[in-house]
Amino acid sequence: MAGPKTYWVYIMANTKRGVMYVGVTSKLMARVWQHRNGALDGFTNRYGCKRLVWFEGFGEPHLAISHEKKLKRWRQEWKFALIERENPEWRDLWEALAGPDRVVLTDEMLRSLAVEDEAMNGFST
């Protein structure tokens, strides 16, 4: 039996104090892999936000979605301060998350992620 599910709010960036993207997902490693590898059209691909610089887990989807929406309304400097409190050098946290060998995702895993995140993004807060 699987343990409780974690819902993640995360920030991707292109450089230190550069362009940032705030997102929410139930599968953090898979979602970050997609951003890093250009598998998603849109903002992160357009602006090169490939570095995972901050993330926080929640036990309930409505809490994660609410926090994501709150962070998206924050001023840029507030987000910088949030990141720098835990990651002052804006290190890419991907390797710490995925391990030195990185994570390999199959097409089936990516399809599963897309379906699950579509359902989560439709969740109302």
Image: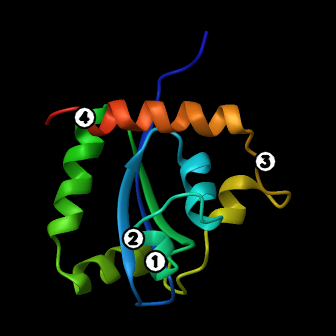
- Closer mark to the observer between disc 1 and disc 3: 1
- Element class at badge 1: helix
Sooner in the amino-acid sequence: mark 4 or mark 3: 3
What residue do we see at 86% from left, 57% from top? Answer: 101
C-alpha separation, residue under disc 2 versus residue under disc 4: 19 Å
**Residue type at numbered disc 2:** Phe
Instruction: Return the residue at label 1.
Output: 46
What residue do we see at 55% from left, 62% from top? Answer: 35
- Element class at badge 2: helix
Crowd around label 4: few <14 · some 14–19 · many ≥20 (10 Å): few
What residue do we see at 62% from left, 66% from top? Answer: 36
- Colour option used: rainbow
Disc 1, disc 2: CB below 8 Å? yes
Disc 4, disc 1: CB below 8 Å? no
Crowd around label 1: few <14 · some 14–19 · many ≥20 (10 Å): few
Instruction: Return the residue at label 4.
Output: 122
C-alpha separation, residue under disc 3 versus residue under disc 2: 23 Å
Disc 2, disc 4: CB below 8 Å? no
C-alpha separation, residue under disc 1 versus residue under disc 2: 5 Å
Residue 33, x across and y down, in percent = 63, 56
Instruction: Return the residue at label 3.
Output: 104
